Amino acid sequence: MTDATAADEDAVDIDVPPDPLVGHPTTAYFWGHVAGSGTVSEDSIEVVTNDETSAQVLAAIADGDVSHDTTSREYAHDTSITRTEDEYTLSIGADEDGLLGRDSARSLPVDGRGNYRLSAFSRSDRELLRGLLEGCGTICFKSKSGTVGISFVHDDRELLALTQDLIADCPVEAPMGDLSETSSGGYWFGVDDAAAPAFGSWLYEDCEVTGCFAPSRRRKLERSLEQADAYDDQ
């Protein structure tokens, strides 16, 4: 692996609070990513993303090193299909005092029973959901129906149930399907196709204000919406 460098220095010039566990748009985005695509142990946190700018933003929020590699993985819905893509891994290790990252970033916020404790970020639900989407979600254009698809996939059923609750509470009406098992043994649910454009647009609205977003994922949403509009005009 080689160290990744920021493609755009301005992309990581963001407002970062001293405590990564307090309610703030940047911390909400960070912990959404950790929950969606992170691995937490007693002495380290690793977060994986396919977007270099997003990886550098996460590193700016919580400190850590970013490495770059390519990987091939199976599609969650069809394990007979694989794809190869860039992968950026943020690694946050313990310092000499045994602390991870910025002071109190010791672990994914959970309660004593292992349930996610993300209520501190309730005022930044859009950034939290954006981090979750970029961590364990997909955006696609469905060529057969001419619609945009937004879905979330994860091995942790409880995390997806929490994500459904967050979407249900967001200001955009976004009906969802039930949680279902994937062919790879995890779980998934999708936002109704009719609601996906409004939900996706709300999710990335004004994202430049905080800088907490993956540019490649936003471009994917924009292209999918354009394809859906073109399909309707046929």
Image (cartoon, rainbow, N blue to C red):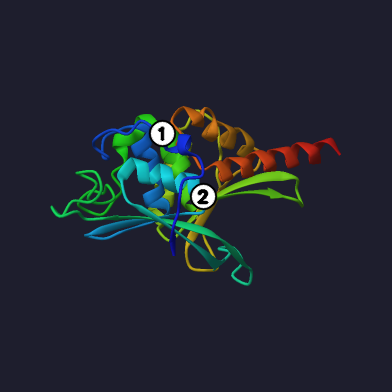
Q: Which mark is residue 51?
A: 2
Q: Is residue 86 above or below residue 132?
A: below
Image quarter for residue 131? top left
Judged left or right of residue 92, residue 37 is: right
Front residue (pair 201, 155): 201
Mark 1 lies on a secondary structure that is loop
Identify the residue at horizontal 65%, vertical 38% (top origin).
Answer: 222
What type is the residue that disc 1 sits on?
A: Asp
Q: Are marks 1 and 2 in contact (CB under 8 Å)?
A: no
Front residue (pair 149, 25): 25
Count of marks, rendered view: 2
Q: Nearer the viewer, mark 1 or mark 2?
A: 1
Residue 60: tell me if it is visible: yes
Q: CA distance from mark 1 to mark 2?
A: 17 Å
Identify the residue at horizontal 55%, vertical 36% (top origin).
Answer: 174
| x and y percentages locating residue 5 in the rendered image | 45, 50
Which residue is under mark 1?
A: 13
Identify the residue at horizontal 23%, vertical 54% (top origin).
Answer: 113
- Looking at the rendering, in which quadrant would you find the C terminus? top right
Q: Name, please, the residue furthest toward the left.
A: 97
Residue 133: tell me if it is visible: no
